[in-house]
Image: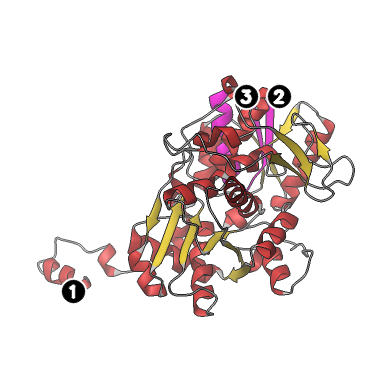
Amino acid sequence: MPWPYRLQCFDCHTQFPAQTTNYRCEKCGGLLEVTFRISRRKVPWTKRGLSVWRYRELLPVDNDRFITTLAEGGTGLLHCPRLGRELGLKRLYVKNEGENPTGSFKDRGMTVALSKARELGKRKVVCASTGNTAASLAAYSARAGLKCVVIVPEGKVAAGKMLQVVIHGARIFQVRGDFDEAMRAVVTLTEHRKGFYLMNSLNPFRLEGQKTLAYEVCDQLDGEVPDSLVLPVGNGGNISAMWKGFGEFQTLGVTKARPRMIGVQAEGAAPIAKAVKRKQDRIEPVTNPRTIASAIRIGSPVNWMKVLHAINESHGTAETVSDKEILEAQRNLASKEGIFVEPASAASIAGLRKNREAGKIDRSDLVVCVTTGHGLKDPSVVDYLPKHEGYTLKITRPDWIGRLERTL
């Protein structure tokens, strides 16, 4: 059973019953979030295996029989010494969320949100997505036996992610336009058809699963907290959920501090990073966002207010990176550390490099980069790989061994 919790408006702090199914505050229209009544106490999960549900007491599902899981969480926190030496960092780690069941961090939030949907009696779930959310929701809906609808931007979803949606049996609808247009369609559907339950990061229960990323990082570091936590930002749910998770561990007394939060966005889809750099308290949405990193190709992120709060309260920052820098970081991480991630994930590595070169991160800092999805989610990057004769060397030629040695 979870510890006592309630829903509260992030903006005006109005409180609502724990079983509220609304996504926004009835008083001011602000986003809702789950707040647990936490005090310093001995935590009960230290002997449990690493997973999302290891932290059962801090997850808002009241009855265990509704829990729907695919064994998500428990992803590797990998020390990256070779890449660290190149970047001038002694302690660089990558939290590899591509190890989750459907290959992305979305599974953390989906196991909790889908479990809560079942507890609330929902039978139809829906999301807007650029791919990863749709893939995750399709899998967990299949696991739970719920009807699933996903709305995606026409022609803008990576093939690997679309295959996952199809194979899990979800109903797919496409809209002309970008993710923001798909999101508007989902909101309209759920407002006019109350039987559909929205599963995007507007849903406060989904972010509760994503906050376990922060818990795991702390536990894997034996209670030490990173100096800086770097991660890609699209809709903003992940960075704000992690900041909440770090705060809850600090309140519990598990840790003594929280990290600086550094969000990274692609240059063509960077409303949050631009607001941070300009010291603005609001974002200016980007019309027709463009980037190869489809998972963060979002021009009007719904969680922008939470993201700005997390960055500002942590004395963090935000960075923009080009598609070229993203692709270089993707290849660098794969070739130096054996970690293959999708382009959006590599944005965190590219952003770390820029912050390091600008002197915003010290050589001795403990840095964790979150990579949010597996590289096979978006195989289109093969078109951008550099050509090299070593890839197509024919062993039928008499001098093939000598030529092979010259390529190494």
Give the mark nearest the N terminus, 2 or 1. Answer: 2
> Mark 3 sits on what residue?
146
Which quadrant of the view contains residue 304?
A: bottom right
Please state the horizontal and vertical placement of residue 107, each as a whole percent of the image: 54, 39
Amino acid at dot 3: Leu
Q: Quadrant of the C terminus?
A: bottom left
Please state the horizontal and vertical placement of residue 235, each as a whole percent of the image: 67, 53
> Mark 2 sits on what residue?
120
Whole-Å distance between the Cαs marked 2 and 1? 64 Å
Residue 244, label in figure: none
Q: What residue is rendered at 31% in x and 69% in y?
A: 388
Q: Nearer the viewer, mark 3 or mark 1?
A: 3
Please state the horizontal and vertical placement of residue 163, each as a whole percent of the image: 51, 39
Identify the element where label 3 is drawn: loop
Amino acid at dot 1: Arg
Whole-Å distance between the Cαs marked 2 and 3? 13 Å
